[in-house]
């Protein structure tokens, strides 16, 4: 099954994708609230950040971004601590990048995920987090709240480090496990 | 665990609960946009009062609400304290003046303007927090989806939102079950007994079954939706979206007023370029 570039960039959109993003967002919301360890105010070392990795591997980058972005809105609604749309958009960018690994030939649904893909994935995660939390979020925070940027920077750095750590340390073993589980026919050899 | 959450699944019977999702979403979004756009205490204070009235009017669970409000206030105070540590004279930039009230050292001073800025900021955050707290507790997931759709958000996105909320109770139940069963097998999650890294590794052991069970459902749900013809037509109506009630009709002028207020704020900001972001009564 070959996908075109635009399909790879946007993800394939059908009912399954919609449900996948919804469940991803719900998981993200729950894990944001319960599966984490607080680092600073507004940021925590949370296991939620593996969700974009999985949604991205299964459905593509845009679903991954949406799962992270909407998942953050869901988390805000669940936690009841008010909305932080600047962080949601930062999450969207970070999630989008984490989901881009499919562009480089990884296909977790079919069981294809090698060490090469893991390295590419790690690099993408760092770029995504740096761009999302280091550029998009501080910019939006400044635009909307014009609050002291130093604190946003501290939070942004905490977010970049903690989220990239989770995406890499927890995400890679998880992706390997999922790929192994989904591997179909990889142990078959062609008979002459 | 689920009773810690603030989502309501069953609509209540107060005035705000009975409104349509359309009205709730519009008022909520407008209030949040206005609060985000302004630093003027003359706008923030009435909205704060309004949000307190709204919160009380929906008769929420007092204990749960008081706990989260105290938590948010403390978190904000801590944030403000951090700001003060980094820049004690922040009021000079934001309000435009530095009347020293108290001096620790030459650098760590307490100025009236900084305190005024902190007060405005605290009220601003508190108001937007109370507005969203009221909103969460007065809207059901289906109404939220219907309301979002009424402001021309594609229904597939709305579907994602309502589906996500539909599956949160299921996921929390699975999460608790897996966590408890893993702990009975000797998984140590207590922060006093194991380090952050080991705990993070152990969370993977909970996460894998949780994620696999959750994503295994995707196929079933998607098939069920496809069988009922989801995504066949360009548009979709919502079962929970009822006709406008008396309250909805009453609130139309209020919504128009909020839109006008927002436009006025933006125009005022563009035309009359205030030298400083935060207005204070004693600064000209």
Image (tube, rainbow, N blue to C red):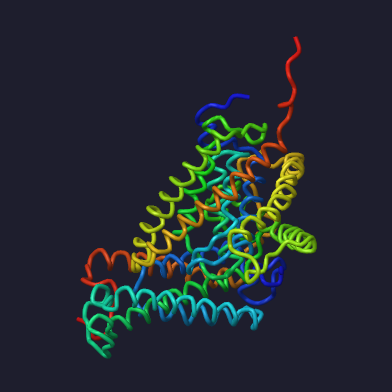
Residue A147, position as x, y percentages in the image = 35, 68
Q: Is residue A67 visible?
A: yes
Residue located 74% across and 41% down the image = B219
Q: Quadrant of the C terminus of chain B?
A: bottom left
- Of B99 and B185, nearer the camera is B185
Q: Is residue B146 visible?
A: no
Residue B281, position as x, y percentages in the image = 27, 84
| Residue B12 to residue A161: above or below | below
- Of B74 and B180, nearer the camera is B180
Which image quarter: residue A150? bottom left
Residue A149, position as x, y percentages in the image = 34, 65
Residue located 24% across and 86% down the image = B282
Which image quarter: residue B139? bottom right
Residue located 49% across and 45% down the image = A125
Q: Quadrant of the N terminus of chain B?
A: bottom right
Q: Is residue B163 left or right of residue B262?
A: right
| Residue B230 to residue B165: above or below | above
């Amino acid at each position: 099954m070959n996908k075109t570039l635009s399909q790879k960039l946007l993800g394939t959109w059908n009912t399954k994708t919609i449900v996948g993003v919804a469940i991803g967002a719900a998981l993200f919301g729950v894990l944001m609230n319960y599966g984490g360890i607080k680092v600073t105010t507004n940021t925590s070392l949370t296991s939620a950040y593996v969700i974009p990795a999985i949604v991205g591997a299964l459905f593509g980058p845009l679903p991954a971004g949406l799962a992270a972005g909407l998942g953050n809105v869901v988390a805000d609604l669940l936690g009841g601590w008010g909305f932080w749309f600047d962080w949601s958009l930062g999450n969207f960018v970070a999630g989008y990048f984490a989901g881009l690994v499919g562009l480089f030939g990884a296909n977790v649904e079919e069981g294809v995920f090698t060490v090469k893909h893991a390295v590419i994935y790690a690099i993408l995660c760092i770029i995504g987090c740096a761009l999302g939390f280091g550029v998009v979020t501080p910019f939006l925070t400044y635009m909307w709240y014009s609050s002291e940027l130093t604190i946003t920077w501290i939070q942004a750095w905490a977010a970049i480090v903690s989220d990239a750590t989770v995406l890499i340390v927890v995400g890679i073993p998880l992706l390997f496990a999922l790929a192994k589980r989904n591997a179909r026919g990889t142990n078959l050899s062609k008979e002459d | 665990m689920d009773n810690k959450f603030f989502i309501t699944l069953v609509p209540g019977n107060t005035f705000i609960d009975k409104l349509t999702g359309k009205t709730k979403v519009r008022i909520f979004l407008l209030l949040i946009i206005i609060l985000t756009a302004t630093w003027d205490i003359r706008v923030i204070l009435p909205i704060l009062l309004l949000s307190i009235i709204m919160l009380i009017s929906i008769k929420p669970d007092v204990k749960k609400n008081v706990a989260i409000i105290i938590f948010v206030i403390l978190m904000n105070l801590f944030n403000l304290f951090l700001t003060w540590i980094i820049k004690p004279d922040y009021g000079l930039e934001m309000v435009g003046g530095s009347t020293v009230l108290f001096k620790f050292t030459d650098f760590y001073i307490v100025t009236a303007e900084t305190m005024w800025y902190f007060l405005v900021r605290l009220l601003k955050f508190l108001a937007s927090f109370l507005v969203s707290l009221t909103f969460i507790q007065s809207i059901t997931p289906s109404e939220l989806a219907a309301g979002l759709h009424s402001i021309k958000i594609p229904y597939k996105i709305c579907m994602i939102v309502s589906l996500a909320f539909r599956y949160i109770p299921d996921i929390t139940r699975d999460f608790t079950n897996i966590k408890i069963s893993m702990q009975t097998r000797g998984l140590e999650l207590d922060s006093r007994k194991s380090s952050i890294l080991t705990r993070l590794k152990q969370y993977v052991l909970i996460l894998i079954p949780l994620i696999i069970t959750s994503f295994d459902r995707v196929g079933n749900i998607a098939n069920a939706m496809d069988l009922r013809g989801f995504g066949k037509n360009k548009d979709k109506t919502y079962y929970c979206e009822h006709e406008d009630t008396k309250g909805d009709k009453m609130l139309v002028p209020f919504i128009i007023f909020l839109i006008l207020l927002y436009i006025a704020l933006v125009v005022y900001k563009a035309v009359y370029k205030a030298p400083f972001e935060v207005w204070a009564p004693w600064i000209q």
